[in-house]
Amino acid sequence: MYDSIAHEALIEKILRLAELTRSEGLNALEAEAKKINSLFFKTGLMLVVDGTEPTIIREVMQNLIEADELSPQELTSRKIVMQGIISIKRGDASQTISLLLNSMLGESYIPLYYNVGVPAIMAEAGADKSQEELDEEYLLQSLQLLQGDGQVSDQEGVLTQAQIDAIVAGMLDS
């Protein structure tokens, strides 16, 4: 379960970076890159900021992946990061990025795209909810699907942004 939640947190971080880039531009992405501890993740983001073509970004990041001996979890994490960064560079829609990244986790994660993807929550949420409330709602729905029963009676399973960031940082720091 930890691996699934950690990968979900990583995908959420990438989706937030994609939205930030779309709304505020590359300068905002550069500022966020400075906050990321993972050299692999930071390198990819800086390649985007520097205007590097997606094919070159893929080559550089693939070389970095192949140069290291990685655990299966770390390999998946890096593939998610690589594809997420390339999607940010291409300007892919959040829905597309969500499907692409969740598909790397297997067929059981496709419902996360079709049932509780960011666009579905945004459409249902209305304008009166903060981004934090939307993030919490999305994560709760994701956790419900990951738990398999679709029902969570309280919010104890919801991770805070700090917990998500800690999981992502712990996965990518090596």
Image (cartoon, rainbow, N blue to C red):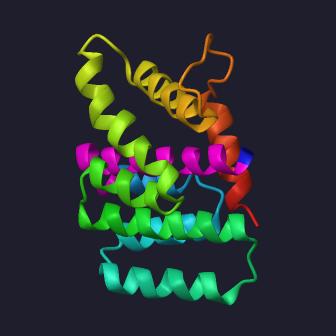
Whether the magenta-drawn stretch holds residue 37 is answered as: no
Q: Residue at x 58, y 68 (%)?
A: 78
Region in magenta: 3-27
Residue 129 sits in quarter: top left
Check the image and report above or below for 43 versus 154.
Answer: below
Q: Quadrant of the N terminus?
A: top right
Identify the image quadrant of the C terminus.
bottom right
Is 56 left, or right, of 25 in this rendering? right
**Percent position of residue 12, x then y:** 48, 44
Question: Hey, which quadrant is residue 16 in on the image?
Answer: top left
Q: Residue 93, how many percent across, how many down?
A: 24, 52
Res 116 seen here: yes
The residue located at (49%, 27%) in the rendering is 141
Residue drawn at 63 percent across, 38 percent down: 164
In depth, the one of 37 and 161 nearer the eye is 161
Magenta span dominant secondary structure: helix
Report the front residue among 53 and 153.
153
Residue 159 at x, y percent in the picture: 64, 28
The reply to whether the magenta stretch includes residue 10 is yes
Residue at the spot x=48%, y=56% of the render? 107
Q: Is residue 35 above or below residue 73?
A: above
- Left or right, 90 with respect to 148, comes to left
In this view, the residue in front, 124 or 84, is: 124
Can residue 16 be seen here? The reply is no
Task: Please tell me in which quadrant of the rendered image residue 9 appears.
Answer: top right
- Please determine whether, in this image, residue 45 is positioned above or below residue 162: below
